[in-house]
Image: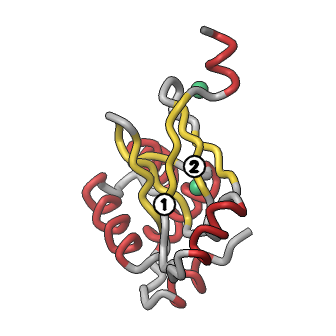
Amino acid sequence: MTNYISLLKENDLKATIQRTSILASIDDAGHINIDDIYDNVKKQYPTLSLATIYKNIIVMQENNVIVEVPMNGEKSKYELKKDEHMHLICQECGHIKDTKITSETKEALIIENFQLKSSQINLFGLCEKCQSKA
Ligand SMILES: [Zn+2]
Ligand SMILES: [Zn+2]
């Protein structure tokens, strides 16, 4: 269980109830879009507006607490900032699976003498479930 209050403070953000509940919702789901975050947070705080959630998401993104994952033709999803990883994104059901960056990719960076600061590798396709439905 992540300590959202210290996570926010480490990144120079005030720990508000709005922010910690958004983070809990993201953490719970792994990867989640804003509408689903809104549905979750609303259950606990019915007065929170979508605009407020949106504003907080942008601030937390700018402060490296959460990361936006673009979805092909759909609303972006968000995840907590984690160690470097790749995304396997299903274009059918929208499921996102985290997977390790291959050692070949890491080797290539060493060979090119490229100092990696941040990365996002998103691979789009069909998940196991959706393949068997086809
Ligand atoms: Zn799928
Ligand atoms: Zn991820």
Mark 2 lies on a secondary structure that is strand
Whether the residue carrying mark 2 lies under 8 Å from ligand 2 is answered with yes
What's the amino acid at mark 2?
A: His
What residue is shown with label 1? 120
Q: Are marks 1 and 2 in contact (CB under 8 Å)?
A: yes
Q: Residue at x 59, y 62 (%)?
A: 24
Image quarter for ligand 1 equals top right
- Which amino acid, by three-letter code, is at mark 1? Gln
Looking at the image, residue 28 lies above or below residue 39: below
Which residue shows up at 62% across the image and 62% down it?
Answer: 105
Residue 57 shown left or right of residue 84 in the figure: left
Above or below, 106 against 25 in this view is below
Q: CA distance from mark 1 to mark 2?
A: 8 Å
From this viewpoint, which residue is outermost toward the front?
111
- Residue at numbered disc 2: 87
Front position in the image: 77 or 24: 77
Please identify the quadrant where the N terminus is shown: bottom right
